[in-house]
Amino acid sequence: MREFRLIEKDTDISKLKMQKMVWDVVMGNIPYQVVRIEGYVHTIGGKWGDNDYWAYPRNQQPSYENLIEFESEHPVRWGIKFEPIHYRKDKWDESRIEYSAPVTITRNGEDFYTLWGGLNYGIDKARVLISEINEHPINFNEIDYDKRIIGRKVWWRSQPAVITGWCKRQACVILEPDGIEKFSVPAEYVGDPLFDDEEDKISIKSEIFSKYINWFRE
């Protein structure tokens, strides 16, 4: 028979075997550290099975007072925000009011990536991209994913590259050549002045969804 075991007042917290998880759990505005505590199962069933996950505020040490059961199936809160706006546009001696309908993917309540194209397209696309984010080679559910990604070796259009920067709220990385002087223009675009201006340079800014990035390079 399976047994439940909870943290109690007389539990010696210092002797508990805790395994820290890298999940970026934020409740309200407070970041939480999720841990597995061996032998302390509080729930059975669901995604976690024999659930021995607990959480406490990251800026505190675990204690009887702050350890709480963790049952959420989603460590990071991915969301969709739709905020259409009217704005003024001035051109030469004319002024007019125009409309824009951005759809923004949010991560733990903060803007992560914005799409343009209206309500129906934007929300449908955002739902697809959230699925891609959760299946991405980079674990965007991790604490400090934006720092962990720096220095990762990748391929950019079959050319060796390294990630040197992260563009917050844009879901973009900065790529620089790794072991080569600069990125060369793909053969099919040689002679195209527009492509030369954009691609034949020392660094590249690219969305994480780009099909031109191969995320696996030893």
Image: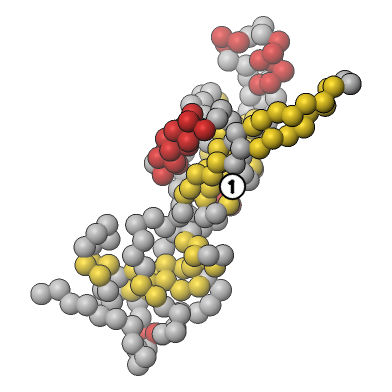
Q: Amino acid at mark 1?
A: Asp
Q: Is residue 128 among what the camera can see?
A: yes
- Residue at screen point 18% across, 77% down: 3
Q: Nearer the viewer, residue 85 or 144?
A: 85
Find disc 1 in the rendering and name its residue.
111
The residue sitting at the bottom extreme is 10
Residue in view at x 63 percent, y 24 percent: 183
Q: Position of residue 109 (x, y in %)?
A: 55, 54
202 sits to left or right of 6: right
Residue 68: percent from left, percent from top: 39, 75
Measured as percent of width and height from the top left, residue 181 is found at 67, 27
Which image quadrant is residue 192 in? Answer: top right
Q: Residue furthest top?
A: 191
**Which residue is at 47% across, 61% downward?**
25
Nearer the observer, 191 or 82: 82
In-image side of 128 versus 154 (left or right): left
185 to the left or right of 36: right
Relative to residue 10, is residue 60 depicted above or below?
above
* Image quarter hosting the N terminus: bottom left
- In the displayed structure, 156 sits above or below 114; it is above
Numbered-mark total: 1
